[in-house]
Amino acid sequence: MEAINIFKNAVNELHGKGSYKTERIITTRQGRLIKTADGREAINFCANNYLGLGGSDFMVEEAKKGLEKYGFGLNSVRFICGTQDIHRELEKKIASFTGTEDAVLYSSAFDANGGLFETLLSDQDVIISDELNHASIIDGIRLCKASRKIFRHNDMNSLEDALKESGSYRIRLIAMDGVFSMDGDIAGLNYVVCLAEKYNALVMIDDSHAVGVIGARGRGTAEAKNVFGKIDIITGTFGKALGGASGGFTACRKEIAELLRNKSRPYLFSNSLAPCIVYSEIKALEKLEHDTGLLGRLNENTGYFRSKITQCGFEVCPGTHPIVPVMIYHEKKALQTANALLEHGIYVIGFCYPVVPQGKARIRVQISAVHTRQDLDDCLQAFKKCVL
Ligand SMILES: Cc1ncc(COP(=O)(O)O)c(C=O)c1O
């Protein structure tokens, strides 16, 4: 069949470009150590398991309680019969944790971004978007009739130029990641908020790599940049620091939440988040509200690893975030190095074009609160053996 041949050729093209993705299979819980399908044990440095809650007994036990009390699933979207008391409770907790008025749950952060822009904006409005925004923001913007302007990555002059050029629109919405996942750099949100105030714009950030991870209490980019409570819209995920299962949210002003509940398509037309996830996320947030111990360990580990890997002579993207991209530049070498590191018991992934720009291949090391000092030293030693 011609169609199937077209697909086959497309797959072959991916192989040819070296961008065909093979999935490594693990046979254990997510956590500090994982086992691959061929029985190899490795220290895990590629999960977004920043606080170590993923795979923890804590999350598993809370999820079991949620499963017992609230059942497996709701067989419904939220507005038919899919809203339990815990869904509203989690939404209130997320709002308070992120310094916003209300929040709306989604099946994923991808859906949260997908259902945001189209709901709020029309062709009278403009979205001003960072050039390195996550795919889900880009796709969400594509679904929307608003005009769009792209500003240079985290460049406030470029953002201001775009704001100046867009004075004729009804609503101006600045959209960017709080933390950019490929470089681990953090949005200059304090400057963004100043510009938004000056030009009467709204600010939306995707804080998927920031909530639970940065800021003195782990409240995300707004806290880290001293603008807590000043962000109009924050999207985020439960799939990273907050336990790593699935689900996402949009935390925002109450009028925006009301509109999303009424008009956002992935919210209206997709099943409610599973009760055991909702229940255990409430418990995770309660834990993080009262105890910054995990965050402290994460910061200590990140500081140690960043300083040691730099001392060893590797080039890393500068910063303070537990995403530590070690630059390899050469695409094939990055993939080979990741495989060699696995042979040495270190589980990392090489990132190549098109996920990162051509010639900027890297190995993204992700630090977790559950790594021991020995784990970090083992990783450094393995890098020395495999790269230098
Ligand atoms: C910045 C950012 N936004 C959104 C997502 C999507 O999150 P989810 O897995 O909840 O759809 C990701 C995950 O890769 C991400 O890194």
Image (cartoon, helix red, strand yellow):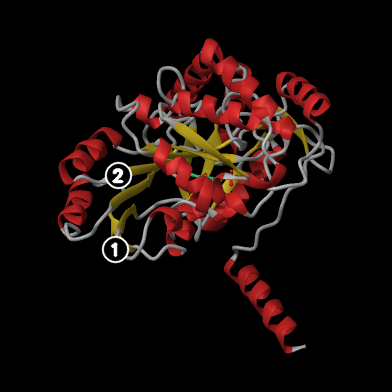
**Label whose residue precedes the other's in the sequence (1 or 2):** 1
The picture places residue 141, in percent across and down from the top left corner, at 42, 59
Q: Is residue 355 visible?
A: yes
> What residue sits 66% from the left and 58% below the top?
21
Front position in the image: 63 or 345 = 63
Is the residue 278 above or below the residue 300 in the image?
A: below
Hey, which quadrant is residue 44 in on the image? top right
Q: Residues within 10 Å of mark 1 (few under 14, many from 20)?
A: few
Q: Please tell me whether mark 1 sits on a helix, a strand or a loop.
A: loop
Q: Which residue is mark 2?
A: 202
Residue 340 in the figure: left or right of residue 135: right
Front position in the image: 189 or 319 = 189
Q: Which residue is mark 1?
A: 124
Which residue is farthest front?
A: 80
Residue 170 in the figure: left or right of residue 265: left
Q: Please tell me whether mark 2 sits on a helix, a strand or a loop.
A: strand
Front position in the image: 143 or 363 = 143
